[in-house]
Image (cartoon, rainbow, N blue to C red):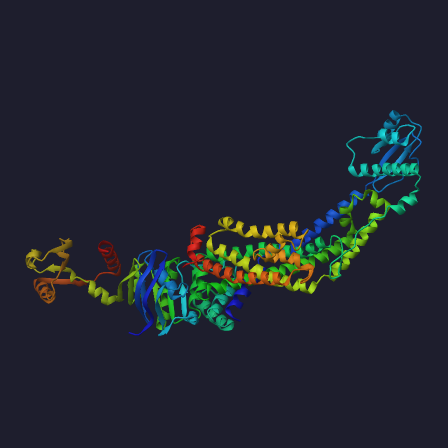
Amino acid sequence: MGKIGLIIRREYLAKVRNKSFVIMTFLSPILLVGMVVLIAYLTQVNDNEKRQVAVLNQSAFFRDLFIPQRGVSFIRLDGLSLEAAKDSTLSMGLYGLLHLPERRDLVDVTEDAFLYTKDAPSTSVLEEIESIFEDGLRQYRLRELGVSPEQYAAVRSGYEIHTATFSGERSTKGINEFKALVGGAFGYLIMMFIIIYGGFVMRSVIEEKTSRIIEVIISSVKPFQLMLGKIIGTSLAGVTQFLIWIVSASLLMVVALLLLDIDPAILLEQRNMPGGLDAQLGTGALAGDETSRMILQEFLQLPMGLLIGFFLVYFVLGYLIYSSIYAAIGAAVDNETDTQQFIFPIILPLMLAIYVGFFSVFSNPHGPIAVAFSIFPLTSPIVMLMRLPGGIGEGGVPVWQLVASLALLAGTFLGIVWLAAKIYRTGILMYGKKPTYRELFKWLKY
Amino acid sequence: MSSILSIREVTKSYGPHKALDDISLEIPSNRIFGLLGPNGAGKTTLIRIINQILVPDSGKIYLDGEPLTQKHVAQIGYLPEERGLYKSMKVGEQVLYLAQLKGLSRSEARSRLKYWFDKLDIGDWWGKKVQELSKGMAQKVQFIVTVLHRPKLLIFDEPFSGFDPINAALIKDQILELRDEGASIIFSTHRMESVEELCEYIGLIHRSRLLLEGRLTDIKKAYKQNRFRIEWTPGNGEVALEQLLNGTPVEVSHFDAEEHLWDFTLQVPEGEKQRLLHTLSEKGSISSFRELVPTANEIFIETVQKKDLHG
C-alpha cells in the first residue's frame, strides 16, 4: 500500500470508529423517519376528528344539502327558536350551530345565515360549510338560467395546452420545475456533502495541528499527500455514512408505515388541500391525475445514466475543490472558533448556487443567469446538475456550455488544490497565531 | 572523520526575516552531534530542512553523499520538540501506522515494536489510547516511533523534556546504544550538562548563522585560558603565597587555617606550568592540581554574548 493509501485507510478508520460519527450514522435515520411518521400520524389523527355542527334551518332551502363531509357532520334541529337551539347546542357539547333564517329568497338566506361557535371556528370547518353554500348558490343560479347541472358539468371541463419542443418531444406543464427539482436534489446532495464532510476535513486538520503530531507525519510524507489522503479518507467515510442513511432510512420508513398503518399518500395529499370547486366537480382532479401521470412518465424517461454520470463528475471535482479549501483553513488556524471568518466566503457561493438554482433555473433552465452560474466553477456543480435533466444538445444544455463548465471546473480544481496545498504546507507549522488574509497571501509565496 | 550529512550553504528566509544565513556544516557519522543555539536561532528551521519539511531558498544537503530526496525519509528519524500523537488512536496501531509511513512493512514493524515495548518496559500498552497515557508514557511511545525504522540519522530535539530523571537516564542509555549500533545522531538542546555528557561534536547557531563548529574537546582547548585550580598545604606553616609565586595574581577561594590548606585559582603563563608544579611541591604538598577547561555552558554564553556585543 502506498503512503497515500495508508493515510486514506487511517483517516477512514479514525472517522468511522469515532463514537459521535457512529451515533450520528445510526441515529439520524431513526430521527428522520420518526419525524416523518409523527407528522403523518398527526395529520391522520387530525383528519379523523369529526366535528358535529347543529343546523337550525328555518328556511325552505338547502334541505338535503347538509350531508356529512370529511371533517364535519350535521345534526338537524327542527322547530326550535334560535335561542333554544343555541342552548341545546351548548348543552349537547356540539362544535357549533349553523342558523339559516326564514327568508323568501335563497340568496337572502345565504346572506343572513350565521355560524355560531364557542371559539373562532377552524378554517377547515368553514371551508366545508362554505362550499355547501357555494354549491347551493350555483345550482340555484343555474336553474334560474335554465341550465341543468349535467349541462354545466359538460360545459365546464378543464383544459391544459399540449406543449412540445420543435424536435417533436412532447413536454408537460411543470416539467421544467420537476426536472430542475430532480437535478436540484443532486445539487443539494453535493452541497450538504461539502458542508458536512468539508467540515470534518477541517476539524481533522486542526486536530493534527493541536495534537502536534503533524510534524512527525510530514517528516515522512509530503504535506500534499497528507492533505489528499485526508480528504479522500474522510469522503469515503462520508459516502459510507450516506449509503447507510439512505438504505436504513428507506427500510425504516417502509417498516414504520406498515406497522402504524399510515398511508404515505396522506403526506402528499395535504399539499393539494384547497381543492374547492374543481375538486368537487371532479375535473381538476382529473387534470391533476393526468399531470402526475405525465410527470411519472417523464421521470422514467429522464436520462438517468447521464445524470448519475455527470453527478459523479461534478460531485468529485466540486467536493475536492471545496474540501481542499477547508483543509487549508484548518491548517491556517489553531482552533475551530477562529475558522468563522474564513468559512463564510466558502458557504456563500454554495448558498448562492442553491438560491439561484431554485429561483432562476426552475422557471428558465436555459436563461442567461442559469447559464452563467452553471459555468462559473464554484457554483457549477450545483446549478449545472439542475439544468442537466433537460438533456444535452437541442432542447437541453448546449454542448459548449457543458464543455466550458467542466473545463473551468477542472482548471479551478487544479489551481485551488495547488493554492490550498501551499497554505496548508505553511499553516500546519504555524502555532499560536490567528492569521489574517494578508498573511495567508504571504504564505503562498514561501 | 567521515560525515553522514553534509549541509552546504543553506539559506532560508520567511519574508524579510532570514532564518538561516549561509549555513555549512558537516554532521559526523556514528557520533552524537550537539546542535546548540538560543531560542529563535534557526535550529528548528535547519532541522525541518533536513527532514524535508521545509525547502531551503538556496544551498544543498547531502545524505551519505547523495542529494537529499523524498526516498531518504526512511533513513531519518525525527523526534520534534513539539511532540504529539493522535489522542484517540490506540498506541499499537498508531506506532504501526507511523512506522509504515516511514516505509516499514506492517509485520516487520509489529515484531520490532514488541522488542521495544519489552525494552522500555511498556508491554501492555498496545490497546491503550494515547489520551489514557501519562505525559512520560506518551514520550516513550514517541521515542519508539522515532527509532523503530532503524534510521541512519536520528534527530532528537530536546529528547529529555517531559521525562522524570529515571526515564531520562533510560532514554539516554538508549541513545548511546543506538550510536554504538552505528546510528549518527543530531541532538538539539538547551541543557548544557547533557551536551557535556553526550556530544562529541557540536555546532552553535546564533541569529541565523553558524558561530562555532567542531569537536567539543578541540573547542574547549581553543577556549581555555591556562587557568589552574590548586589545593596546596605549605610545608612549614605560614607562607606568603603571592611572594612564592612571584607576584602572579591569585584568586583565593578558601583558606583552611587549621589545616593550612589553600584553595586558589591562578593564570599560568604558557610554559610555566612545570616550574610552578615544581615550586609548589618543593615548598609544601599539593592535594589537587587541575586545569580549568571552560564548560560547554560557558562557551555557549561567551560566544553568544560576544556576537551580540560585536555583531
- The image position of residue B299, as x and y in percent, is 24, 60
In this rendering, the answer to whether A275 lies above or below A224 is above
Residue B195 x, y percent position in the rendering: 30, 62
Is A76 left or right of A364, judged from the image as shown?
A: right
> Between A176 and A72, which is closer to the camera in this rendering?
A176
Q: Is residue A194 visible?
A: yes
Query: Which of A328/A264 is in front?
Result: A328
Q: Is residue B26 above or below residue A200?
A: below
The structure residue drawn at horizontal position 63% and vertical position 58%, both measured from the top left corner, is A384
Quarter of the rendering containing residue A309: bottom right
Q: Nearer the viewer, residue A382 or A238?
A: A382
Picture layout, residue B105 above or below residue A265: below
Q: What is the x, y in percent for residue A189?
A: 64, 56
Residue B305: x %, y % from top left: 24, 55
- The total of numbered circles placed on residues is 0
Side of A277 where A345 appears, left or right: left
Residue A51 in view here? no
- The quadrant of the image that shows the C terminus of chain A is bottom left
Question: Which residue sits at x=10%, y=56%?
Answer: B249
